[in-house]
Image: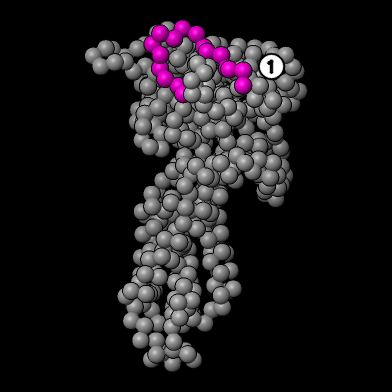
Amino acid sequence: MSGSGSGERDERALVAAECEGATDLRVDVGVLVAHAPTSDPGRLQSFATRAAEDAVDELASATDVAWRFYLEETARLADHDPRRPSEFLDRATHRMVEGPYDLVVVVTDVPLVSSKERFVPGLASPLSRVAVVSTAELRSAPRGEPRRPLDDDAVRWNTATLLVHLVGHLLGARHGEADGGVMEPFRFDPERRAVPSFDADVERHLRSVANEIPATEARPRGPLGRLAFHVRSAARNPGQILQALANSRAPLLPLSLPKLSTAALTPTLVIVFSAESWDVGFHLSDLTAALFAVVSVLAAALYLLFVQNLSFPRKRHRVVTEHTALVNVTVFLVLLLAMVGLFALVWAIILVIEVAVFPTNLMSNWPSLEDPAVGFVDLVRTAAFISTIGVLSGALAGGLENRLVVSHLALFPDRP
């Protein structure tokens, strides 16, 4: 139930913690426990419940709205391997629209790694309103000492502090450097025995956005209705999407996907020495070449989005929340910018080959050219035409060998 009065929630969901606020608004948080194969799910659920109980009072006090944490069914992971937070995104968004919830917190006992391959205790995605907390890093101890147990006081209160800290990020609060509040950069403190408060500035911010916390929901009819809701959601939150795109470095994504880049570049290295490709490139108008490139890049991004099933949640639901829609819009724009980056990469390589390798005096012997003179604009246009073919072949033949990298780069920062 998002906000107040939006319908009754499934009675199977257990209330882990709740605290009333000064207003009638309520924030509903889904807590999803994802455990390793040999772990005791009940123990991890009890740990997550206690963390919610320790955190809920500070959240209600800082925002003046009621908070309720719901404990969802546990999810068993396939192995003990470290996970990126994006690997929980499908489960989290599925729970978010099923609830529906305003926020989702994932608690896991497997190690969590950032995009820079650093082990971290937790990360938050303000755009998707999903936070992930890992007990693996929180239970670590100095060298030579045994790992801390889940019921250790230091683990308990550092987990609650981290949970409040990450929820603060989900609501737009930023790091405070030396204020001593809960939003200072998180560090495990073995002497911690309480949850620090939000400082006055952060509290003012949280109270100012209290009316925006409950998630907007829709029950769109058909593909056009879903598309319209996604467009409206993006139009209401352009800043969040632009920030995620700026953090994603999406045009550089092809450098992290060698299979995609190889599938795009390989055929162009053959085509560039084909007389037919030069004939087409020389006889295309600039407008036609530009439109062909734009349409091909867009088609490649849409193809990868649907064929790789990169929209969230992957199981269709009648309810769509605004933040799930924002995730989907951002992932598509990341793909689009990645295809632009792939186009630029292939175009630069082909242009270098045309200028430095291809013998231009061969053009004078081609009867299809009225004017055998080769200008730089002709080379640019021909390279663009060949690169467009490369982008299409890359999307069709290469695809994304790791679909999780898209959502990870777009949505999650590198540190708590």
Where residue 55 appears, as percent x and y from the top left, is: 55, 14
Where residue 326 appears, as percent x and y from the top left, is: 61, 41
Circle 1 Cα neighbour tier, 10 Å, few/some/many (<14 / 14–19 / ≥20) = many
Instruction: Say whether residue 323 is left or right of residue 175.
Output: right
| Magenta-drawn stretch, dominant element (helix, strand or loop) | loop
Q: Residue at x 46, y 57 (%)?
A: 341
**Residue 238, above or below 216:** below
Where residue 157 appears, as percent x and y from the top left, is: 47, 11
The local secondary structure at tag 1 comes to loop
Highlighted range, magenta? 185-201
Instruction: Say whether residue 19 is left or right of residue 193.
Output: right
Tell me if residue 157 can be seen.
yes
Tell me if residue 73 can be seen.
no
User: Which residue bears the numbered disc 1?
Assistant: 64
**Residue 66, above or below 375:** above
Front residue of 121/328: it is: 121
Residue 330 among those drawn in magenta: no
Q: Which residue is drawn at 48% across and 76% down?
A: 377
**Residue 291, above or below 189:** below
Front residue of 187/177: it is: 177
Q: Residue at x 45, y 14 (%)?
A: 158
